[in-house]
Amino acid sequence: NWSGILPASDIMIASYIAALSETLSTSTIVRRLTSISKAHEAAGIANAVRSLLVRATLRGIKRRHGTSQHQAKPLTKEDLFIVLGAMGDTMKDVRDRALLLLGFAGAFRRSELVAIDKEDITAARQGIIVRLNRSKTDQIGLGRDVAIPYGRSRWCPVSSLDLWFSRAGICGGAAFRPVDRSGHIGTERLSGEAVS
């Protein structure tokens, strides 16, 4: 749409990202530069993205606009208790309560939560141990174990998870699954988008 061509010259790419800097974030510009770079490499042609001119232009954009990432605010313990207190006793509420408490207690990402299988959870004397086979910070899949202790209030992550498993009849496979309007539990894994 910008009228660029392959192979692109360093002047063309620098002009392109300078024009983008008026409307797009720095991270979006970097992502587009990566795509242009990959396109050049896939075509087996000289990659002008690596040129001094393009790198200097990108440094100037970063200096002018900054590179900070916008992150969602974390859920505090007090806010979590307010949310939990407002929940009912439907199958979806039981699942969501277990999901929120386990996620909070283990500081799990949503992708990590939905990847947990029933077999990844083992009982321990003071709670449970959740085995994460892969995560965003463990790309090669070494895995790690996360201990989740029994809660000291009515909001116990271990008890909530046990209640979810028993009410849903989950004996193996995905720990967290979709629940339809009628309260029927699906067999597939809950998606990260659904958790969000």
Image: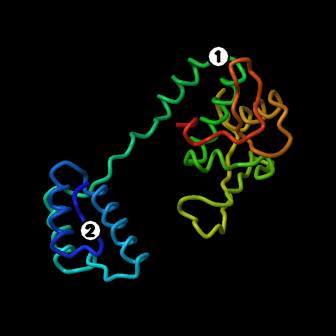
Along the line of sight, which residue is nearer the eye, 187 or 173?
187
**Quarter of the N terminus within the rendering:** bottom left
Along the line of sight, which residue is nearer the eye, 167 or 183?
183
Task: Report helix, strand or loop for mark 1.
Answer: loop
Identify the residue at horizontal 83%, vertical 37% (top origin): 170
Cα gap from disc 2 to disc 1, whole angstroms: 58 Å
- Neighbour class for label 2 at 10 Å: few (<14), some, many (≥20)? few
Q: Position of residue 141 (x, y in %)?
A: 65, 67
Of the residues shown, which amino acid type is indicated by label 1? Answer: Gly
- Neighbour class for label 1 at 10 Å: few (<14), some, many (≥20)? few
Along the line of sight, which residue is nearer the eye, 41 or 128?
41
Q: Which residue is mark 1?
A: 88
Label at residue 162: none
Q: Position of residue 135 (x, y in %)?
A: 59, 58
Of the residues shown, which amino acid type is indicated by label 2? Answer: Ile
Q: Which residue is mark 2?
A: 5
Along the line of sight, which residue is nearer the eye, 43 or 146?
43
Q: Position of residue 28 (x, y in %)?
A: 31, 55
Residue 57 relative to residue 106: left or right: left
Task: Report helix, strand or loop for mark 2.
Answer: loop
Mark 2 vs mark 1: in front: 2
Identify the residue at horizontal 35%, vertical 82% (top origin): 45
Rendered image quadrant of residue 164: top right
Identify the residue at horizontal 64%, vertical 60% (top origin): 134
Vertical placement of 17 versus 69: above or below?
A: below
Image coloring type: rainbow
Vertical placement of 155 versus 49: above or below?
A: above
Q: Position of residue 27 (x, y in %)?
A: 30, 57
Lower sequence index among marks 2 and 1:
2
